[in-house]
């Protein structure tokens, strides 16, 4: 019988990551596109020393207690709100994530959504394909100016900073709000700190880059939309739960919010009959922020190295906790 530790991977990831895991462990990989069921997870973690999970996997206290051998949960993501970190910490289990490697890809995609929503690219594509484009018209599918506009960034972490750097290329004024003031970036990038209400009222575009916490859930709801300039364009590549989606639908319908570019949702995948899917002034993407070959490969290798380090008795490079028995 092999003495190698056992690792369960909850989805197919780039082979570079699997190869790293196989160098020191017996590896089982869930082979299907949809996540493993709860029953499958409970069964597999029962024999696992390491778990490589995705945001779509709910790793709660019950599942952690069902894994007597588990030493590390390596999340293939920057966020880790899918994991009960205190429960893992109490059991002496490392929890790790993959920060940094998806920053540039997600910032690129944020600006792709911003531009698509501002310039009505999806609507134009639809019109062109279905014969709605009759001729060049002075007032046809007019969008919003991006160059020289004001961008409000909520959350000035790695991705927020990368978006602010891109905004400089469009000569945008950048306001930001974050619990931690970024004086270094204020001087380097010319960005301006602002209270949330000020940012909402002064911005032409608002981009969300805050983590999901009890304090930020539904950060943007009816009151926040009412505080915005009429016609503000909203972009969300962070977490769907930061936005009260029912309130957003109302704001999009009445023009309070002029348009939105969304990559994340409270329920994923977004149901086909969701009211957001019926609105012409919304650009919808299926959680593609980090979906480049390079970013997903780097996430896989980082997640694998985190897991291998923990199983080898070393401190992982990217922990989000300090297990009580470490």
Image (cartoon, helix red, strand yellow):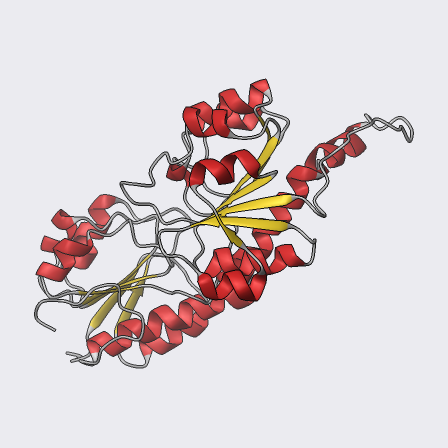
Counting from the top left corner in percent of width and height, residue 82 is at 28, 49
**Residue 45 sits in quarter:** bottom left
Counting from the top left corner in percent of width and height, residue 186 is at 51, 60
Q: Residue furthest right?
A: 135
Up-down relation of residue 147 to residue 29 (above or below): above
Residue occupying image coordinates x 52% and y 56%: 106
Give the side of residue 140 with respect to residue 47, left or right: right
For the N terminus, which image quadrant?
bottom left
Give the side of residue 168 with respect to residue 316, left or right: right
Counting from the top left corner in percent of width and height, residue 306 is at 30, 72
Residue occupying image coordinates x 38% and y 71%: 302
Counting from the top left corner in percent of width and height, residue 164 is at 56, 56
Give the side of residue 108 with respect to residue 308, left or right: right
Up-down relation of residue 247 to residue 25 (above or below): above
Residue occupying image coordinates x 29% and y 45%: 213
* Foreground of the two, 111 or 71: 111
* Foreground of the two, 249 or 5: 249
**Residue 39 sits in quarter:** top left
Q: Is residue 285 visible?
A: no
Residue occupying image coordinates x 44% and y 66%: 100
* Foreground of the two, 184 or 158: 184
Up-down relation of residue 232 to residue 108 (above or below): above
Up-down relation of residue 237 to residue 14 (above or below): above
* Foreground of the two, 88 or 321: 321
């Amino acid at each position: 019988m092999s003495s190698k530790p056992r690792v369960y991977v909850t989805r197919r990831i780039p082979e570079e990551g699997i190869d790293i895991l196989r160098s020191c462990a017996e590896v089982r990989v869930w082979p299907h596109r949809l996540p493993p069921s709860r029953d499958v997870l409970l069964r597999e973690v029962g024999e696992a020393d390491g778990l490589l999970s995705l945001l779509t996997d709910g790793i709660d206290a019950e599942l952690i207690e069902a894994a007597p051998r588990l030493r590390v949960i390596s999340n293939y993501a920057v966020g880790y709100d899918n994991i009960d970190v205190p429960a893992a910490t109490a059991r002496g289990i490392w929890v790790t994530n993959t920060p940094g490697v998806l920053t540039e890809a997600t910032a690129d995609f944020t600006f792709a959504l911003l531009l698509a929503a501002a310039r009505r690219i999806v609507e134009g594509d639809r019109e062109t394909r279905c014969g709605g484009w009759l001729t060049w018209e002075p007032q046809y599918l007019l969008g919003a100016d991006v160059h020289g506009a004001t961008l409000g960034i909520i959350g000035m972490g790695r991705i927020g900073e990368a978006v602010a750097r891109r905004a400089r290329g469009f000569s945008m004024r950048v306001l930001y709000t974050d619990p931690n003031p970024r004086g270094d970036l204020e001087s380097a990038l010319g960005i301006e700190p602002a209270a949330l209400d000020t940012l909402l009222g002064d911005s032409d575009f608002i981009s969300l880059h805050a983590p999901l916490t009890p304090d930020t859930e539904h950060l943007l709801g009816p009151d926040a939309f009412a505080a915005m300039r009429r016609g503000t364009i909203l972009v969300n590549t962070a977490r769907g739960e930061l936005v009260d989606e029912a309130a957003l639908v109302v704001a999009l319908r009445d023009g309070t919010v002029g348009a939105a570019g969304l990559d994340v949702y409270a329920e994923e995948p977004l149901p086909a009959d969701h009211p957001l899917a019926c609105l012409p002034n919304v650009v919808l993407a299926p959680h593609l922020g980090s979906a480049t070959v390079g970013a997903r490969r780097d996430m896989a290798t980082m997640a694998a190295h985190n897991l291998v380090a923990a199983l080898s008795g070393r401190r992982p490079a990217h922990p989000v906790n300090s297990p009580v028995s470490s």
